[in-house]
Image (cartoon, rainbow, N blue to C red):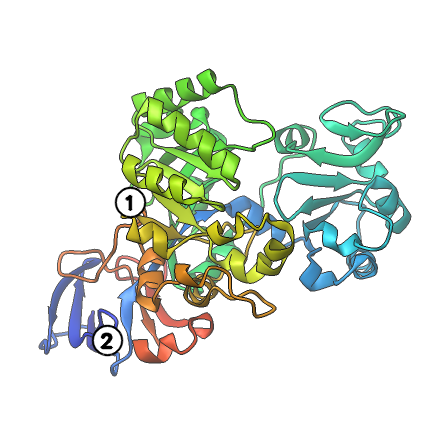
């Protein structure tokens, strides 16, 4: 394959590029076309490395696409949520579960009510319903849903929340594993979702679900083999993945041991350090979920004592005060964060986050200035999967209402792209199209200057992984 007259390196040069056996074999101002070689005219459009989503939850995102959108943006208020659930129920011809995602308490502000099983029972008593908070940490179930999983709603036990009488409120915090064990296991198909990612230029992903085990790994491997999962994949998760350490390929491999920290229920400190050391001992990096100042302080304190393995990561770093930035830089940690959350939730942050913490939300430029490798990601389904919107959010730091959060943290379009197209195994490591490299690329419908006018509107016209536009 010969790509003719492509713009490379963010507009720094124009050249021809040849791909042979999935690798870039030549780049020059002019290359002679070989016999029977497919020629693609770029006509000065930008040719760039393809994208990587460095923090995503594949099964959760695929499931969310088949769920009711219960977000404030979609529903507006509690009445809108009620109508959305009723409308979804009317489209169903069975008595199966109805699943909602993206809920936030702002929907019930000023109503004197709240989302609990009693509210859900009034709206949809005839169907089992479960609704997930946008944080991913809370499920709310109605009475029929509780009975379907073998729970008497009037006589609940932990981890279900109880009212003063001992009855279930319907709320379940941090109980994914408990709920999953009581429900029929049916993993969603990844095909449609994977194709959507591909169309946006994403050819590699890291699944950061902390509960991933060897069976999840086998499911992802099968999906790749059947052509339902087009992307190369690194699978984070728990210790059960150690059984898959020796089965990695170019397309799928085990990643970091994921620790899902929550400041209200942090693990015992000594045991936590022992788990970090155990992961390092078997050759696995660690990745720390840190969405609060407390989470981050706890993780960094432990890593100072255990030592850091190259590739250890902080996920989110949602609130990173200056002393934490300095410590992450000193330890040599990678930060993988989500600027799209500034655009999607920034107005909520301005209302809900402590004023002292607001300047430290979802830092970008200051991390790079401190020498910290930075990678951008979606955290889907908890934020939009669109990498181009995330890049634009990294550039303008603007909320949906137009406020700017942390203007000094903004990235240039080039820096935002580099942080989104980083190496799958080494997030934050910049990739360039060069001779001898894999032909994982995308071609835009404009030059780079045109793309920079509004990155959120950009879509590739062609996407390649190892020089191929379709993967079977």
Instruction: Determine which residue is flagged by label 2.
Output: 11
Q: In the rendering, at what x and y percent does residue 306 appear?
A: 34, 22
Residue farthest front in this picture:
356
Instruction: Determine which residue is flagged by label 1.
Output: 426
In the rendered image, the vertical position of residue 310 relative to residue 406, given as above or below? above
**Mark-to-mark CA distance, 2 and 1:** 25 Å
Classify residue 254 as left or right of residue 88: left
In the rendered image, the vertical position of residue 101 relative to residue 25, given as above or below? above
Classify residue 181 as left or right of residue 237: right
Q: Secondary structure at mark 2?
A: loop
- Would you say residue 217 is visible in this rendering? no
In the picture, the disc for residue 169 is: none
Foreground of the two, 453 or 302: 302
Q: Earlier in the sequence, mark 2 or mark 1?
A: 2
Q: In the rendering, at what x and y percent does residue 155 appear?
A: 86, 24
Q: In the rendering, at what x and y percent does residue 435 appear?
A: 13, 60
* Residue at 72% across, 34% down: 172
Image quarter in which the N terminus is found: bottom left
Asked where in the image residue 137 lies, by quadrant, the reply is top right
In the rendered image, the vertical position of residue 228 relative to residue 236, given as above or below? below
Residue farthest bottom in this picture:
43
* Residue at 80% across, 53% down: 108
Q: Secondary structure at mark 1?
A: loop
């Amino acid at each position: 394959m010969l790509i003719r007259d492509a713009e490379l390196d963010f507009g720094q040069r124009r050249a021809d590029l040849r791909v042979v056996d999935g690798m870039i074999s030549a780049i020059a101002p002019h290359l002679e076309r070989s016999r029977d070689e497919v020629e693609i005219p770029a006509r000065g459009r930008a040719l760039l490395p393809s994208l990587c989503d460095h923090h995503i939850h594949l099964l959760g995102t695929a499931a969310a696409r088949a769920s009711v959108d219960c977000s404030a943006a979609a529903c507006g208020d509690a009445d809108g949520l009620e109508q959305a659930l009723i409308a979804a129920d009317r489209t169903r011809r069975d008595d199966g579960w109805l699943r909602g995602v993206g809920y936030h308490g702002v929907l019930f502000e000023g109503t004197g009510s709240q989302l609990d099983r009693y509210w859900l029972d009034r709206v949809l008593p005839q169907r089992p319903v479960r609704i997930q908070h946008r944080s991913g940490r809370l499920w709310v179930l109605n009475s029929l849903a509780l009975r379907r999983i073998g729970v008497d709603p009037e006589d609940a036990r932990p981890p279900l929340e109880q009212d003063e009488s001992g009855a279930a409120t319907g709320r379940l915090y941090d109980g994914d594993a408990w709920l999953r064990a009581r429900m029929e296991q049916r993993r969603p198909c990844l095909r449609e979702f994977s194709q959507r990612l591909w169309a946006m230029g994403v050819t590699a992903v890291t699944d950061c679900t902390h509960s991933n085990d060897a069976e999840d790994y086998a499911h992802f491997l099968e999906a790749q083999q059947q052509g339902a999962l087009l992307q190369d994949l690194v699978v984070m998760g728990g210790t059960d993945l150690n059984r898959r350490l020796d089965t990695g390929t170019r397309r799928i491999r085990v990643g970091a041991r994921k620790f899902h920290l929550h400041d209200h229920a942090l693990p015992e400190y000594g045991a936590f350090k022992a788990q970090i050391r155990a992961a390092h001992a078997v050759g696995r990096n660690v990745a720390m979920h840190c969405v609060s100042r407390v989470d981050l302080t706890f993780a960094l304190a432990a890593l100072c004592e255990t030592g850091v393995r190259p590739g250890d990561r902080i996920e989110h770093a949602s609130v990173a005060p200056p002393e934490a930035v300095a410590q992450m830089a000193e330890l040599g940690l990678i930060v993988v964060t989500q600027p799209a959350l500034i655009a999607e939730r920034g107005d909520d942050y301005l209302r809900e986050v402590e004023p002292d913490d607001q300047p430290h939300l979802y830092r970008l430029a200051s991390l790079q200035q401190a020498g910290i490798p930075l990678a951008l990601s979606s955290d889907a389904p908890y934020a939009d999967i669109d990498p181009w919107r995330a890049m634009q959010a990294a550039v303008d730091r603007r909320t949906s209402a137009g406020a700017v959060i942390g203007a000094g943290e903004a990235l240039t379009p080039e820096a935002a792209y580099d942080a989104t197209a980083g190496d799958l195994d080494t997030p934050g490591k910049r990739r360039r199209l060069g001779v001898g490299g894999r032909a994982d690329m995308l071609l835009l419908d404009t030059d780079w200057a045109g793309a920079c006018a509004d990155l959120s509107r950009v879509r590739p016209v062609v996407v390649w992984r190892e020089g191929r536009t379709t993967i079977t």
